[in-house]
């Protein structure tokens, strides 16, 4: 779960334009900038941020369950979409934003509240003039990959 010291909200477009992508992402990780409100809703935190690589963690709990009693795939999808989008953002110059163009996820094994901490790690594989491509993994507490994924992002 995110620390109680974390703040949530949005960073204005004007403020984002004044920062490099790495400054922005590192500000989210350090808590000097607010995490988006979905981070509060789902209980995730950005725990590592460097150029081309971002790690997000969450502790699955009963509020994440689907009707089958396992953690809804949307939690993994959100963790992975977020870490990959922020990985691309971390190599972007001032004034450049991005949004997800497409992604694919394969659910290899279920996550339950008993799984323990899960970690989404996004790493930039390539970046062109208009889009980028990220690799990713979502790991269980023992850090065995739980769900493979890839993602294309579109620069704005």
Image: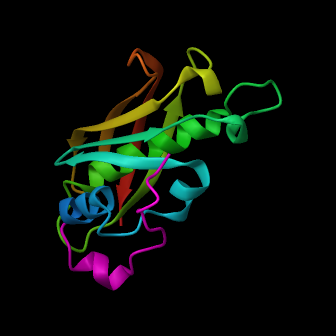
Residue shown at 58% from the left, 14% from the top: 109
Q: x and y percent of residue 99 in the render?
A: 43, 58
* Numbered disc total: 0
Q: Is residue 11 above or below residue 90?
A: below
Q: Is residue 139 visible?
A: yes
Residue pictured at 48% horizontal, 68% vertical? 8
Q: Position of residue 114 (x, y in %)?
A: 61, 21
Q: Position of residue 76 (x, y in %)?
A: 54, 35
Q: Is residue 68 rendered magenta in the image?
A: no
Residue at the far bottom in the pictured view = 14
Horizontal arrangement in the rendering, residue 78 relative to residue 150 (left or right): right
Q: Nearer the viewer, residue 101 or 41?
A: 41
State which quarter of the image contains the C terminus.
bottom left
Q: Decide whether residue 8 is among the magenta residues.
A: yes
Q: Is residue 139 placed above or below 99 in the rendered structure?
A: above
Q: How is the image coloured?
A: rainbow
Q: Residue at x 34, y 35 (%)?
A: 121
Horizontal relation, residue 97 to residue 141: left or right: left
Outermost residue, front side: 4
Work out whether residue 131 can be spotted: no
Looking at the picture, tell me which residue is in the foreground, 152 or 27: 27
Query: Which one is nearer the viewer's eye here, 142 or 123?
Result: 142
Identify whether 44 is placed above or below 35.
above
Overall secondary structure of the magenta stretch? loop
Quarter residue 138 falls in: top left
Look at 54% across and 64% down and name the residue there: 37
Looking at the rendering, the stretch of residues picked out in magenta corresponds to 1-20
- Which x, y percent locates residue 148? 45, 23
């Amino acid at each position: 779960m995110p620390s109680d010291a974390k703040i949530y909200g949005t960073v204005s477009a004007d403020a984002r334009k004044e920062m490099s992508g790495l400054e922005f992402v590192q500000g989210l990780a350090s808590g000097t900038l607010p995490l988006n409100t979905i981070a509060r809703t789902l209980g995730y935190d950005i725990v590592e941020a460097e150029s081309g690589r971002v790690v997000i963690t969450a502790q699955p709990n009963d509020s994440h369950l689907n009707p089958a009693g396992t953690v809804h795939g949307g939690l993994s999808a959100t963790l992975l979409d977020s870490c990959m989008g922020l990985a691309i953002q971390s190599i972007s110059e001032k004034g450049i934003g991005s949004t997800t163009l497409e992604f694919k996820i394969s659910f290899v094994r279920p996550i339950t509240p008993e799984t323990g901490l899960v970690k989404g790690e996004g790493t930039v594989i390539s970046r062109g003039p208009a889009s980028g491509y990220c690799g990713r993994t979502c790991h269980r507490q023992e850090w065995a990959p739980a769900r493979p994924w890839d993602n294309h992002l579109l620069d704005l």
